[in-house]
Image (tube, grey):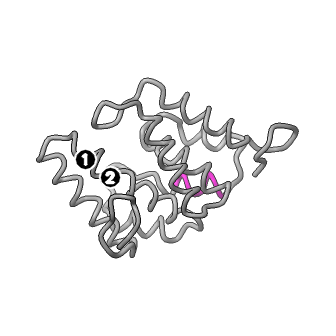
Amino acid sequence: MTTAPGPGPYLTLAETEALAVAAHAGQTDKAGRPYAEHLRAVAEGVRARGGSTEQIAAGWLHDSVEDDALSEAGLAAAALPEPVKAMVLALTKRPGEEPEAYARRILATPGALLVKEADLAHNADPARLAVLDPATRDRLTAKYARMRALLGLCGPLRTDGNVT
């Protein structure tokens, strides 16, 4: 994937970031924070875990189709490498989909697991969860722990997002 401005067949990371931020404009997370903050944290989490440029791009776009911020057709038409599109689609949970099927798709898609790991780490950040009501916090904590187990990301998360 091209990472610097100039001629090339694909969006740069900066252009991918701009696409993701624009696609999620006006959206907020469960705590009422701008959704772009979550996207940035996931992309940075992927980078910090040694992810490739394509995985970082997928980090920016990981929720775009699931949240109806970008259609599947829009993703298909975007100037992105096929591995980025495949990771985004793998990370898109379908309505009514069982967690086991979702986890299998992530595990079967090269690169997607690292992006999901960064996503789960940010979602489970105690500082983010602390602002939620107890019932929501407990429900989400259990949901994220179950998905980590299904993906083989064993061990409890430390507050810095690393596994102990």
Percent position of residue 37, x then y: 45, 37
Q: In this view, does 68 lie above or below 80?
A: above
Q: Please give left or right for residue 100 compared with residue 41 in the image.
A: left
Q: Does residue 137 belong to the magenta stretch?
A: no
Q: What stretch is highlighted in magenta?
A: 83-89
Q: What residue type is labelled 1?
A: Leu
Q: Is residue 93 above or below residue 50?
A: above
The crowd level at tag 1 (other Cα within 10 Å; few <14, some 14-19, many 20+) is some
Numbered label attached to residue 69 = none
Using the rendered view, name the quadrant where residue 26 is placed.
Answer: top left
Numbered label attached to residue 125 = 2
Q: What residue is shown with label 1? A: 129
Q: What residue type is labelled 2?
A: Asp
Calculate the distance from the C-alpha at mark 2 to the C-alpha at mark 1: 6 Å
Q: Does residue 86 belong to the magenta stretch?
A: yes
Seen from the viewer's position, the closer of residues 8 and 74 is 8
Tag 2 near tag 1, CB within 8 Å:
yes
Seen from the viewer's position, the closer of residues 8 and 98 is 8
The residue drawn where x is 59% and y is 39% is 73
The crowd level at tag 2 (other Cα within 10 Å; few <14, some 14-19, many 20+) is some
SS state under label 1? helix
Percent position of residue 5, x then y: 81, 37
SS state under label 2? loop
Seen from the viewer's position, the closer of residues 127 and 83 is 127
